[in-house]
Amino acid sequence: MESEPAAVHPGRGPRFEPFRALRFAPDTDLGEVTAPPYDVLSTADVSALGERSPHNIVHVDVPQAPAGMAGTDRYAAAAARLSAWCAQGVLVRDERPSLTIYRLSFVDGTGRPRELVGVLGSLEVVDEGAGRVLPHERTTPKASTDRLELTRATRTNLSPVWGLSLAGGLSAALTEPGEPVGRLRVDGVEHVVERVTDPERLARISGIVGSDVVLIADGHHRYGVARHYRDELVAAGDPAGHNGATRTLAFVGELVADQLAIDPIHRMVRGIPSHRLRAALARDFELVPAPGPTMAGGPGVVADLVRDERLLLVEDGREACWLVPRPGAFAGVRALDGAWLEHTLAGSGAVMDYQHGLAEVLQVVEQDRDTAAILIRPTSLAEIERTARDGILMPPKSTFFTPKLRTGLVLRPLDD
């Protein structure tokens, strides 16, 4: 388990600065050249996006090996492609340092319209445990070699970390529109980006972000790679490169309930037969027969869990039962479904994996009768903020923030 950072206090925020952004040229169809984050793309997704345009960002962000070349050369190919796009005017560098306001309008999983606003800028890379920029959950082991190799080759931040500022007033400071630089609508979400170059406004926004802690909502591994790359340059005695690597591209929004949509990441349980799983769960939960969920149930299933304060076990295809917490069973345990399950299943031999989306969960359970699913509730914003303030970490995969940010709207060369 990762070490837990010390408790933090207001007024200890990170540096957050403007930079000379690299953007697709004006009048580019951003729907053709941007993409979801690399870590949510399947191989088929990458192929489809790549076929959409020879300039889609996946050609750089998820590079493929050129024909007849070894796979390790794909990073060099990505760097060459990025350089060529700049030379050809496909990508254009801002003349002056800027911050980019990023607005997203969407309907969440419950049918509620929402508007999310944040700002893309250059966020300080701090040492682990130093405060200012904090994880909110323990991360699962994950190979970071791919992102590190890509950063080494391109010397560019291609996709942003998503941070949540605990400072009040950030949303208000972003209300006034900036200079329009792009708009697209995809999968029901409208994405709008606006450039800010006024020195006074830049200083005000940077000051707000720097006044309190930034919590990493999405992109823990990207931030870890940025820290690794910075340390690598320091060790190599590259002061010029090290200067740019002391910061990384980040989208920072305010931690406010009316903007953020958080979905649960459900637990998939393997390695234990059904009768032993139910016996382990029965220690802390009452198991009550329930109708099996259907894909058509959608957000209504999760809404029922929240309303009735319970979880749902699904196994053997669609057989299901409610998991109703027994009085006092979780005294002294964080009020998080993921923490409850870790507590209850400790020592049982159960192996937990993670899956977002009801349809995807049910597909796994139907195809693998040896896998059970436990549907859990979304983590509350209040619990997320308490996590940051208390300097403690949630279980892995406690939150799934939506909608996902588009890669390619803003790139950050490390020579800024």
Image (tube, rainbow, N blue to C red):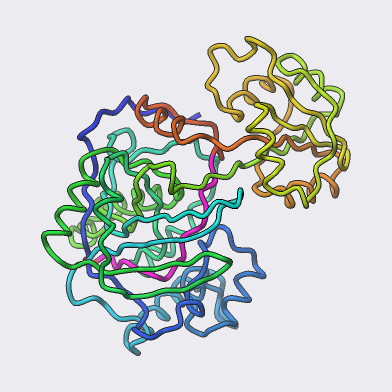
**Magenta: main secondary structure:** loop
> Does 373 sit left or right of 20 as displayed?
right
Whether residue 3 appears in magenta in the rendering, the answer is no
Pick whichever, 322 or 77, lies toward us.
Answer: 322
Residue under the image location 87 percent in, 36 percent down: 319
* Quadrant of the rendering where the C terminus is positioned: bottom left
Taking the view exactly as shown, the residue that stands out farthest to the bottom is: 88
- Percent coordinates x, y for residue 207 in the rendering: 17, 48
Vertical placement of residue 278 versus 298, above or below: above
Q: Relative to residue 259, is residue 296 drawn left or right?
A: right
Q: Residue at x 26, y 73 (%)?
A: 179
Q: Residue furthest front?
A: 112
Q: Is residue 134 above or below residue 286?
A: below
The magenta segment is 399-414
Which residue does the image show at 25% across and 45% down from the upper left?
A: 169
Position in image of residue 253 (x %, y %) = 35, 50
Name the residue at the left extreme.
200
Is the residue 157 above or below the residue 253 in the image?
Answer: below
- Of residue 370 and residue 302, the one placed in the foreground of this image is 302
Q: Nearer the viewer, residue 410 or 108?
A: 108
